[in-house]
Image (tube, rainbow, N blue to C red):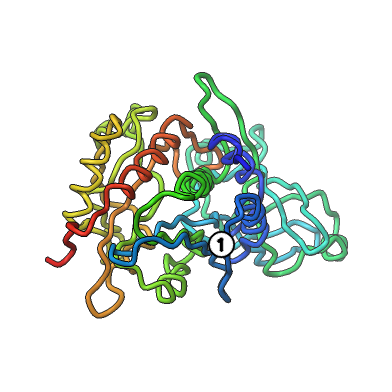
Amino acid sequence: MTLPSVADLTVELMLIPGLAGYETRVANAIKAHLDALGLPHRSDRLGNLSCTIPGDPALPSVMIFTHMDQLGFIVRKIEANGLIRLERLGGVPERALPAQAVLLCTDQGDLPALIANKSHHATGPDEKYKVLPYADLYVDAGFSTSAEAQAAGVRIGTPVTYLPRALTLANGRIAGTSVDDRAGCAALLKLAEARIGKPGPTLHFVWSVQEEYNLRGVLPAATALQPAIALQIDLLLACDTPDMTTRGDVTLGGGPGISLYSFHGRGTLNGVIPHPALVRLFETAATTARLPLQRSAHTGALTDLSYIQFMGPEGVACLDVGFPMRYSHSALEVVDPSDLQGLVTLLDAAMSAITPDLTLTR
């Protein structure tokens, strides 16, 4: 069985809603592909999906993971007139919310709706350039009363996501919802396919939960697997648009990359300074595979790798590996599938390059 292309897998997974804490449908789609590959898998109580390909026990075990969830909202209140108020879940950019299409994911089915935007003809000069806090926004799903909304399955706590969409742009690039991190999920599936039957270390593939909520959903899986090395797949901020040029040199279509430094910088004193042996491993693997290797260093973002590095009596050797992406956390993010395929090739080459000479002790 051969999986679809990384581009097709990305689109398939982007079109499945999966708010943090509600990843089941995404996990089921990934499980179906693992079943097609003949790879056994398991889920823990939080919903983390794991698959292991056994390897040489003399080599350090590796956990490669990416998150299934997406950011969005939770229904906070249903007004008497049927309009709906939201609570933000994850780093949703408030300035990008008015007039966005959303999806109410009820137990009775998914309902399309929109975040209202005040009619332009009634907007005063003092309102035209004002960003409304999310608590002031409301969702219109077409209901006339609260009872009507509740009869359709809308409840306090109902998950809400951006309306899933995927657009094919010029040069095969893809715009869509939750590129972060369904593109990573697709790349991890293709990596699992590529590693079947190859010699190397024991590899644990994990599709994790609740990254957009608290960055800690993966911890039960990491605790159970006890890897010596952890590699996290996520976006790298593309810096090739006019508003991003001072942030770095990562370009869309420029190939996969690694993060040399990340730090949240907004109240969470956490981030990742990568293990130097892993940086050298991936630099060598990129040269061997004749791939470009982009380098990222930035403040303002954080991944769940930040917490895994401190696990166990000796810690875990960690490295963030990623793909360039534009417009993070907006309703339409942009990725180049060639970067995703390059990422799969890079990870495959790096896993083949792990030998007993790889020293992790500092």
Q: Quadrant of the N terminus?
A: top right
In the image, farthest residue toward the left: 362
Report which residue position mark 1 lands on: 20
- Residue 64 vertical position relative to residue 170 in the rendered view, above or below: below
Check the image and report above or below for 35 versus 117: below
Closest to the observer: 211 or 75? 211
Q: Is residue 60 left or right of residue 90?
A: left
In the rendered image, is residue 117 in sight?
no
Q: Is residue 68 visible?
A: yes
Q: Nearer the viewer, residue 176 or 56?
A: 56
Picture quarter containing residue 118? top right
At label 1, the amino acid type is Ala
Please tell me which residue is depicted at 25% across the width and 35% down the height of the picture. Answer: 288
* Viewer-side residue, 198 vs 287: 198
- Relative to 268, 283 lies left or right: left
Q: Where residue 271 appears, x then y in whole percent?
A: 27, 60
Residue 69 drawn at (x, y percent): 55, 57
Picture residue at 51% right of the left edge, 46% below the top:
193
User: Residue 225's x, y, as percent?
Assistant: 41, 72
